[in-house]
């Protein structure tokens, strides 16, 4: 399929966590098929809910830990990193 913006550039397809994403390597536009945005949003919410519960459990175990915890990336962040950096 050709990029709707660039007209002559063929879209590349990538899969992330079971969701196929079409993107243009030239303009970096992203196109999703019907229902894919909803899947991304739902999975992102599930990851946020899991991460929040996990952070709460960890904070209860070690109040005196002085080292900051590394925050886990979200699916949306992974998606844009994949498109920006290629895969």
Image (cartoon, rainbow, N blue to C red):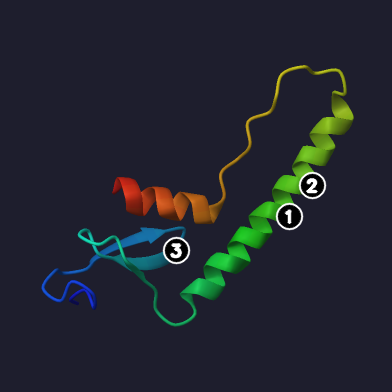
Q: Position of residue 65 (x, y in %)?
A: 80, 18
Q: Nearer the viewer, residue 57 or 73?
A: 73
Q: Is residue 9 left or right of residue 72?
A: left
Where is mark 1, residue-wise?
49
User: Of label 1 and label 3, which has the lower sequence position?
Assistant: 3
Please state which of the two labelled residues, at mark 2 or mark 3, is closer to the viewer.
2
Look at the numbered disc 1 and give the secondary structure of its residue. Answer: helix
User: What's the CA distance linking mark 1 and mark 3?
Assistant: 20 Å
* Contact between labelled residues 2 and 1, with CB atoms less than 8 Å apart: yes
User: Of label 2 and label 3, which has the lower sequence position?
Assistant: 3
Where is mark 2, residue-wise?
53
Q: How crowded is mark 2: few (under 14 residues within 10 Å), some or many (20 or more)?
A: few
User: What's the CA distance linking mark 1 and mark 2?
Assistant: 6 Å
Q: Residues within 10 Å of mark 3 (few under 14, many from 20)?
A: few
What residue appears at the point 77 percent right and 39 percent down from the top-left corner?
Answer: 55
On the image, which quarter does residue 46 sit in? Answer: bottom right
On the image, which quarter does residue 34 sit in? Answer: bottom left
Residue 40, placed above or below residue 77: below
Q: Which residue is most to the bottom? A: 34
What residue appears at the point 53 percent right and 54 percent down from the top-left corner?
Answer: 75
What residue appears at the point 14 percent right and 69 percent down from the top-left corner?
Answer: 9
Where is mark 3, residue-wise?
18
Residue 18, placed above or below residue 63: below
């Amino acid at each position: 399929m050709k990029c709707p913006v660039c007209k002559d550039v063929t879209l590349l397809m990538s899969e992330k966590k079971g969701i196929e994403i079409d993107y243009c390597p030239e303009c970096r536009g992203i196109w999703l098929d019907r229902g894919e945005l909803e899947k991304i949003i739902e999975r992102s919410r599930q990851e946020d809910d899991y991460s929040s519960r996990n952070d709460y459990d960890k904070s209860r175990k070690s109040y005196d830990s002085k080292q900051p915890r590394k925050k886990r990336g979200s699916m949306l962040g992974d998606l844009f990193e994949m498109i920006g950096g290629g895969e």
